[in-house]
Image (tube, grey):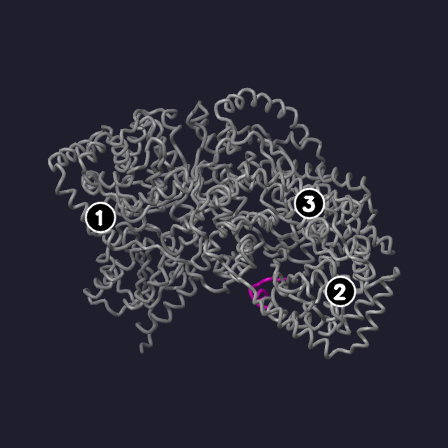
Amino acid sequence: MSLSTPDWLEGPYRTAVERSRERQPRFESSSGAEIGAIYGPEALADWSYHEKLGYPGEYPFTRGVQSTMYRGRLWTMRQYAGFGDADESNRRYKFLLEQGQTGLSVAFDLPTQIGYDSDDPRAEGEVGKVGVAIASLADMEVLTAGLPLEKVTTSMTINATGSILLAMYVAAAKKQGADLAKVGGTIQHDVLKEYIARGTYIFPPRPSLRLITDVFAWCRDELPEWNTISISGYHMREAGCTAAQELAFTFANAIEYCDAALATGLKFDDIAGRLSFFWACHSNFLEEVAKFRASRRMWAKIAKERYGATSARSQMLRFHTQTGGATLTAQQPLNNLLRTGFQAMSAVLGGTQSLHTNSYDEALALPTEAAVELALRTQQIIGYETGVADVIDPLAGSYYIEALTDRVEDEANQYLARIEDMGGGLACIEQGYQQREIQESAFRLQRMAETRERIVVGVNQFQTGSVVVPEMLRVEAAVARNQVERLQALRASRDGAAVDAALARIRAAARGTDNMVPLLIEAVEAYATIGEICNVLRDEWGEYQEVLTI
Amino acid sequence: MTTEQRTIRVLIAKPGLDGHDRGAKVVARALRDAGMEVIYTGIRQTPEMIAEAALQEDVQVVGLSILSGAHLELFPRVIAELKQRGVDDVLLFCGGIIPEADVPAIQAMGFAGVFGPGTDTGVIIEFVREHAKERA
Amino acid sequence: MTTLDDPIRGAQAEWEERVLAKVLQRFPERRAEFRTSSAEARRFYTPADTAGKDYLRDVGFPGEYPFTRGVQPTMYRGRLWTMRQYAGFGTAQESNQRFRQLLADGQTGLSAAFDLPTQIGYDSDHRMARGEVGQVGVAIDTLADMETLFEGIPLHKISTSMTINAPAAILVAMYMVVAEKQGHPVSVITGTAQNDVLKEYVARGTYIFPPRPSVRLAADLITYCAREAPRFNSISVSGYHIRDAGSTAAQEIAFAFANAIAYLGECERRGAQIDEIAPRVSWIFNTHNYFFEEVAKYRALRRMWARLMREQFGAKQTDSWMFRTHTQTGGSTLTAQQPLNNIVRAAIQALAAVTGGVQSLALSCYDEALSLPTEAAQRMALRTQQIIAHETGAADTIDPLGGSWYVEWLTDRLEQEARAIMDRVEDIGGAVAAIESGYMQSEIQEAAVTHQREVETKQRIIVGVNDYIDDEAQPPILFRPNLAVGEQQVRELAAVKARRDARAVDAALARLRAAARGDDPLMPPILDAVRTYATLGEMCGVLREEWGEYRPPTVV
């Protein structure tokens, strides 16, 4: 009998491998690190329980941010939705709430995300395509009609124009008579990652950071339940980076935001409690669990050691998760149901606060209602039937999970150190560093699939079988026409002088240092459009030029 | 038929507002590694900008990538702009999230290849080599 | 590990008082008590919960006693588990086509389901068979049907698992003769016959004879195969059906092991050595929804069996200690409502089975709660396994959850619970006595009733059934075998009977009768009878006359 893992590896294991080779010459994590045949107690040698894990709800929060976790309340099941016009999206939200969803998540069309009105020539063909078109407060009013904004929390995937959409949401809530102290939700508002991966930037980094810190400051005083930013690894992961890079690049961006806030005189404890994070969950089942655990431990240390955070609230990393869109395949679309299901399990085992499960038909087109419902059912089955939500951090102590958690943390810390050496997250973006790293990883993944080192079921193996083309959702061209007509009618009916005055005040503020948020609210209440506001800011601040890397 | 084998020049472009450039960049990189000269435009290109780049860079091949669903609106405009500049002999291909049902319409516009998610880059390289030759 | 315990226990108590008590006061938990099927689920686990555990003694290394971490040293890094979907319906010809399709799709082994008349030993033309022929599986009356079923499928290469119990010895004999006719000696065939009749009395109901002669017949097949077809698993002891009838995970382990002990005891009584027969015992277990309990169950099963074989039965060979199992995901966890939800359930169960280290796996298909599985659903089940194998990384390191305090604690707990139930069965006088007295049946029923009550009071949510219900009726996904199958099968049976040598049949059946009356091995006369194209019903008829039929005790 073997007495230790090295004995076993050198003895029985080696003999077995020599007799009959393993399936692959090497097994790897997403970052290419080797995965061992077995992990044993030596993984926990020199390992201190209290230093590495502690208790749920306590520093360093490895085991979770609440002391009862899902035994108290399940995660928020939040499906990203929105398409066509505001009215159609509003109906979808009501449907999802009826189906048992517990929070809303709004997707916006590209013109809204990049600050063009629906009738701008650059918006042609894009209106209502990947999300809902919101050109003015009038659209926001339709979008939120009948939804009790004091009760539902809304997560808005909006970045460059995040402050404007927040202003519209606040204005709509005020019109409903809601108490702003009770209005909760999230705006993504993480512009730095847009330069790296997602591409919906407008302005250069400095003024973009200013809008972000303005939102931090305003929400601290006026909208205390609002998560002011959702610092996102998701899109970088989708663009092809590894799990460790996802953490490192995201924390590098987070550090930029916090530093920018401190530079304006805010205190870390003032803003930290409203920071939230957004991770992807890809297919490597246990590596993803380890990533989520490592992310909490890393951020707790950054908050405590770098920023001297004192309250638990400022040290804890709370996050939303979305399953990996890039892992879905157009081939054999029902297979995506499985990928999403496993990824959702990982996210829950990793202790996510909220979760979006992708619909199986997303690699083909916008998700259909039936597919969205099934994605939600997946979360409910995990929550109610599998028992995985009944024990906190159930994988803790697994030699493999603890070793992986340590390793993901180490790898991510190495990237962070390199970024620090190069002058920080923003400087690296301007040099194209993260962009290049991500492309390298994406290219490596693609090559591995093409050489079949990495098998993607239904794509490079097991391709047989009849093709079931699910029903697909299309956005009617009429949506765009109606949206444009409504917008033009609005321009004709509003008080033009009030709009002009509000825009002039925005222009003045853009030149100075006053907090922009109150002025944005004033402008949207006068029904100034998103394009009008952004054009003023473009005039003053210029536009960002992409750093091209292949 | 030309006897001289000139290097294939390819323009990879992302029309519209969509910023998901992973696929475009992976394809650009694969074509470059296969020995072609690749010009990548970056994101958010208008049809005018793409046609102008195709003309200026004197490419034989134009590949468009779009994931936002605006392909049926944007592709014809790219083609119109190309024609307006007298660029009517380039090999056109595209990729992204394109429903099966739209493929015939896109082929009718003049796209010789439509490559959905999961396509092997080797297939695209082969396709470009095969078809670009005819136009060299 | 032990050095960590005390400080953790102390600190945890302090944390519970300082932090948790206040939180619970303001925000009570979702339930007063959380449980898996067999154990409580504590809030969380720390090293203190596995104190006293000795890694080398209780966990060890893959491929080494007590095999908690797996039976092979490389596990799925070497070879993936066998992906085996249960299939078979209608006539032998139709099933043969489905088999060939599955092999073309990348499946690596076959699994045959038989119709109820075959399972209960009636020919297709028996009045009890009316309406049942070819309905839940393929109809096999004679060797001729078995020849058709495996036409073009090389039996020396493909392994076949046969879900057959009371008449297992007869069906295996047919399979052996087909292999011989294909030109392959019986010594090379691989595969499995369920041959576990005891659980039929407990849960599944396809018994024929009373328990004691049934155990004898099973033991004869096991002993015969151990000597003549050493690569064939002559028994697959089933926890599956016990679990699907409503038992807990601990009962599933305990009753299956108790039954196995009864078979092995009978084999030993009939002259077999434990090291001759133990390596050929295989298993089928069920995987239900509680993810971690299922992972822990497979770990506990391996450790318990190793200890049982080595310490109690005195087995000397490593092969005798190894617990290798097939798994089917839980048919009874599937819902007729919102059937696509079943894809998710089966997938999570399959992931648990793989994480637990099983040797072969079948998923219940998402449309099974509505009808026999469609081909699309079968393929989906296979794709699920392929995605787990190739995309999730779960097969890349061995026993990935080993060390998790929760999983280790649950593994220990299941072992204790199952051990206690096995002791109780032992006290009653062993599995046969426990079945004859109705003990196993009533225990399972108790657990099933508890479960049902929890569902009805919504203590237990089943998505789409007692919560998150959809108004609109689901489109039925229906697959029905043709009812004309019965008539066709009857015609073919008549043709076989017309062309065989009736005198040879009679003589073979007479030899079978003589063996059944005495204590001689039964396999040789069965094989002889099969070769004459004696029917399954004829052979079972002889045995029914000699041994009688089983009448169940009524348990309420």
* Secondary structure of residue under mark 2: helix
Q: Mark 3: which amino acid?
A: Glu
* Secondary structure of residue under mark 3: helix
Q: Residues within 10 Å of mark 2 (few under 14, many from 20)?
A: many
**Residue C114 placement (x, y as % from top left):** 66, 62
**Residue A84 placement (x, y as % from top left):** 29, 49
Answer yes or no: are tags 1 and 2 on the same subunit.
no
Residues under labels 3 and 2: Cα distance?
A: 27 Å
Residues under labels 1 and 3: Cα distance?
A: 61 Å
Q: Residues within 10 Å of mark 1 (few under 14, many from 20)?
A: many
Residues under labels 1 and 2: Cα distance?
A: 74 Å
Residue with the mark numbered 3? C252
Residue with the mark numbered 2? C170
Chain of the residue that carries numbered disc 3 in the rendered image = C
In this image, B14 relative to A442: left or right?
left
Q: Residues within 10 Å of mark 3 (few under 14, many from 20)?
A: many
Q: Is residue B111 above or below residue A188?
A: below
Query: Which of the image's four quarters has the N terminus of chain C?
Result: top right
**Residue A314 placement (x, y as % from top left):** 42, 27
Residue A483 got which mark? Answer: 1
* Secondary structure of residue under mark 1: helix
Q: Nearer the viewer, residue C77 or C132?
A: C132
Whether C107 is among the magenta residues is yes
Q: Which residues are magenta?
A: C100-109
In this image, A190 relative to C386: left or right?
left
Q: Mark 2: which amino acid?
A: Ile
